[in-house]
Image (cartoon, helix red, strand yellow):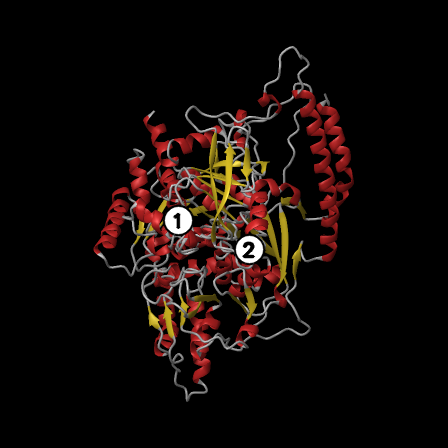
Amino acid sequence: MIHPVRRALAVAASRAPRQFLAASRTTSVRSVRAAAAGSYYSTTSRRLQDAFPSQLENLASSTLPKVVPQVPQTLTEKIVQSYSVGLAPGKKVKSGDYVTLQPHHCMTHDNSWPVAMKFMSIGASKIHDNRQVVMTLDHDVQNKSEANLKKYRQIEEFANTHGVDFYPAGRGIGHQIMVEEGYAWPGTVTVASDSHSNMYGGVGCLGTPMVRTDAASIWATGKTWWQIPPIAKVTFTGLLPPGVTGKDVIVALCGLFNNDDVLNHAIEFTGAEETMRSITVDDRLTIANMTTEWGALSGLFPIDAVLASWMRAKATVTAMEHPELGDKAKFTHAKIDALLENPLVADPGATYAKQLYLNLSTLSPFVAGPNSVKIATPLKDLEAQNLKLDKAYLVSCTNSRASDIAAAARVFKDAAADNNGVIPKVAPGVKFYIAAASILEQKQAEDSGDWQVLLDAGAEPLPSGCGPCIGLGTGLLEPGEIGISASNRNFKGRMGSTDAKAYLASPEVVAASALQGKIAGPGWYQKPEGVEKVIIGEGNGVVEQDKAMSIEDALDKIIAEAESLIAAAETETETSTPSSSSPSSPDSEESLTEILPGFPEAISGEIIFCDADNINTDGIYPGKYTYQDNITPSKMAEVCMENYDPSFGSIARAGDILVTGFNFGCGSSREQAATAILAKQIPLVVSGSFGNIFSRNSINNALMGVEVPKLVQRLREEFGGENKALTKRTGWKLTWDVRRSKVVVEEASGKKWEQKVGELPPNVQEIIARGGLEKWVKSQIEA
């Protein structure tokens, strides 16, 4: 065999050329290691199943001295390090590690009662740390039905019983409350049972979504599991020109880097001090919020002077308006001093899976849509099309803070100058809806007069809450209508009819469009001299550094190939059997997964193919049903995939295997996206790739899934084309051999082929066999 010392020397020798580069750079790119980080199920070998790999102590060699290298960490890794429990002494967490996470705070909203039901069903009776939990009512606040009001009362009573911080309907959207009340504190991990918890990254807090079952676990134990995603660094250069906003930044990023560039990544935004000063905290919150739509699991901004100034202002206002709170206030100058004394920053030389850059100076106003954030068009191009507008929305946690309301009001104030000083009305036939992100933001807008300006213009006020952004309440899009919104998500059917068209833009573009009756801007954009196109790319945007990193990428590839060859040679040597006295079994030549008693060794069925990428949770399970807690399984089965293809229900059959394109299940954190498929009696979903939160929901709810990109490609070759069906019965059969970690496909022609896939380890089998994580936790409590 190859001796470990020889192997170490070989690898060290291959790494030598890059040591010089490492000394002169600030970051590294190791994209070859990112590819393995997005697999649907853990491929950890059986010997590691009793603990998270990151929590196992490395065994010291008996012949070599133990060396503890100083491992540079990203900002994300440093924050996770601080909130991970049970780590081995000296362990530095890194991307790819599984950790037991004890978040600073956990927020639930209208789903608090379903979470409470899960919490009680597992046998828990007391919240582990009631200071950790926050409950807000924000999604269905316009619904005055007795069933919804009863649920709201149950949530409030539960919160009061357990001493949990509670915010009633109308107080504001949960994510805004988490920020303005200081729960999302810089340098902490704060989670929420909602996909837009990424927003907390705007204030330097690592916000990431959890699902209902995870929230119940946190309530009961204070902890949950998390795998640190691959981490992408996005560098901003230049300065935001006048008339360009944070919304334009994130719409451009979603639309220009639209090939799942940051899918299931944690993002860290960075840039020169001057560049970052041009991005206000409100703009940062908008950008971080919509990293969800970009496909990321978090969007983290630095703890810098811009954030410090914002926090100081809040501390000063709090001290003036509520002097009785003293040091009990959420924002105090003493707390900020402590934060800034030693702020967390990424280490020089920290490893990033991917690096991208955007030159802000080259950016102009952008609009997303229709019905997709991956379609981003310069505003001027849409203005030329004279797209008649039916509805406009200044709503949501993304863009309805006081500064956003002020920008919209300015559009009408400017127009009043040409209207004898009278605030003009919105265009005939257009309805303009406004709802503040929180009652505090609305009060600030009222005090400044901006709220009244919009009311005078004919805007229709809605309660502070999610409302039309999630397809609930007043003002939804009707068939054939065109709407433009300052919110975060424009998936087909999310804001109303699947036959409507929804666009996303900044608050001032929304207001200008409402005023003019077509998609239009206010004319504030000032194009810098010499700018002809948006400058984006891979790297830092600094030519010299990017060239050095490109060289290192090539070296990393060589190193990875060398390590792979050495590991393969070791494996071949170590697993060879010198004795030939006993015949080898068919299984002896391949690695086999242990199958728990009673768990099926294989799952088979006919392939039903939904040929689309980015089928989101609204497409799988419409938002209008999400907060109706009395939906029966038969009804869930009936509406499954309704927004994607209304004919899906009549085509799909029990026992089918659903195959879809890439990034299946992106979007919100609703668990019903998984349970609706189970209600349809489809036991297995196969895709090119999954959205991370859907993967988590699937495991937690006992829906099996596996990624097979080759199958998607082959199906598209056979059934694609201009006239392809949204849902197609293929006549092909798929068998997932769980024991051998492979799928076998039999095409209609009789041709068979197979493909290796990720392992379904016994610990995940056990969760699925129990009927999901909730029932598994209950079994552990009862044991």
Q: Nearer the viewer, mark 2 or mark 1?
A: 1
Instruction: Identify residue for label 2.
Output: 304
> In the image, is residue 221 above or below residue 670?
above
Instruction: Identify residue for label 1.
Output: 670
Residue at figure coordinates x 54%, y 35% from the top left: 743
Specify the quadrant of the image occupied by residue 468: bottom left
Q: Kindly identify which numbered label has been placed on residue 110.
A: none
Residue at figure coordinates x 45%, y 54% from the top left: 333
Dot placed on the residue nearer the N-terminal end, 2 or 1: 2
Specify the quadrant of the image occupied by residue 542: bottom right
Residue 288, percent across and down?
50, 56
Q: Quadrant of the C terminus?
A: top left
Q: Secondary structure at mark 1?
A: loop
Residues under numbered marks 2 and 1 in contact, where contact means CB atoms less than 8 Å apart: no
Q: Of the residues shown, which amino acid type is indicated by label 2? A: Asp
Residue at figure coordinates x 50%, y 25% from the top left: 594
> In the image, is residue 51 above or below residue 257?
above
Residue 69 in sight: yes
Q: Of the residues shown, which amino acid type is indicated by label 1? A: Arg
Distance, label 2 to label 1, CA atoms, is 34 Å
Q: Is 504 in front, or is 748?
A: 748
Residue 413, percent across and down?
43, 80
* Residue that protrudes farthest toward the front in the picture: 749
Q: Secondary structure at mark 2?
A: loop
Q: Quadrant of the N terminus?
A: top right
